[in-house]
Amino acid sequence: MSEKLDISFDAISEALHGFDFPEVDLVLGIARGGTPPACMIAHQLGAALKIVRISHRNDANEPLYQEPVVVSDFDWDLFSHHRILIVDDVSVTGKTMAAVKERLSGHEVHTFVLKGTADYVLFPKVKSCVAWPWKNTIDA
C-alpha cells in the first residue's frame, strides 16, 4: 500500500484563503470527510452552513451500496439560499455529489473538493491518497 501524503491544516487553510470561490449563500458539507472543509469555507465566506449525510462507503472505503444514498432529511428551508456550494474532502467518481445535487434542482449549485473531481478543486495536482489532519489519530 502506498504511503499517504500529509497535508497540514495550515496548508489547507492558506490554500482556501487564496482560492477564488463562486458567490454562494449556503455551504453544504458532505458529512464526515466534507464537514471540516465545509466549516472552514462557510466561515471564510460568511455563508450559511448545513451538513448532509450520505451512505455509500464504510470506514475502510469499501462500498456499502452500489450508489450513494442520501440519509439526511432534505426538508430544509432553502428559500434564501439560491447559490449552493457542495463540499467534500475527496471525490473520485462524483456520484456522491451528484446524488445531492439532483435534490437541489432550481438552485445554482457548484461542487468543491480538496482533491479529486468537482467544479472546483483545491489541490488539483494531488493524485495520491491524503492523510487529512482531521482524520489523523493518536495511538494511546
Image (cartoon, grey):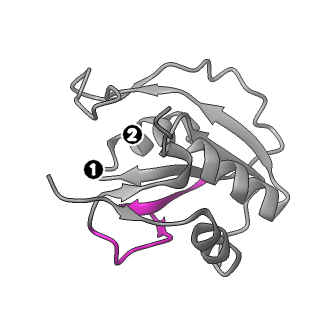
Looking at the rendered structure, which numbered label has been put on residue 52?
none
Position of residue 107 in the picture relative to residue 66 (left or right): right
Residue 106 visible here = no
Residue at left 64%, top 69%?
10
> Looking at the rendering, which quadrant does residue 47 occupy?
bottom right
Secondary element under disc 1, as helix, strand or loop, is loop
Q: Residue furthest toward the front?
A: 140
Q: Position of residue 97 (x, y in %)?
A: 44, 44
Q: Secondary structure at mark 2?
A: helix
- Residue picked out by circle 2: 96
**Residue 112 sits inside the magenta stretch:** yes
Label 1, residues with CA under 10 Å away: few <14, some 14-19, many ≥20 = few
Please say if 8 is above or below 69: below
The residue nearer to you, when weighing 25 against 71, is 71
Q: Amino acid at mark 2?
A: Thr
C-beta proximity under 8 Å, tags 1 and 2: yes
Q: Which residue is at a point 37% across and 58% down the rendered structure image?
A: 130
Q: Residue at x 66, y 70 (%)?
A: 22
Residue at image x 18%, y 58%?
2
- The kind of residue on which mark 1 rests is Thr
Q: Which residues are magenta?
A: 107-127
Residue 1 point in image, percent of width and height:
14, 52
Neighbour tally class for label 2: few under 14, some 14-19, many 20 plus, Cα within 10 Å: some
Residue beneath disc 1: 93
Residue 6 on the magenta segment: no
Q: Give x and y (percent) for residue 107.
A: 64, 48
Q: Is residue 11 above or below residue 113?
A: below
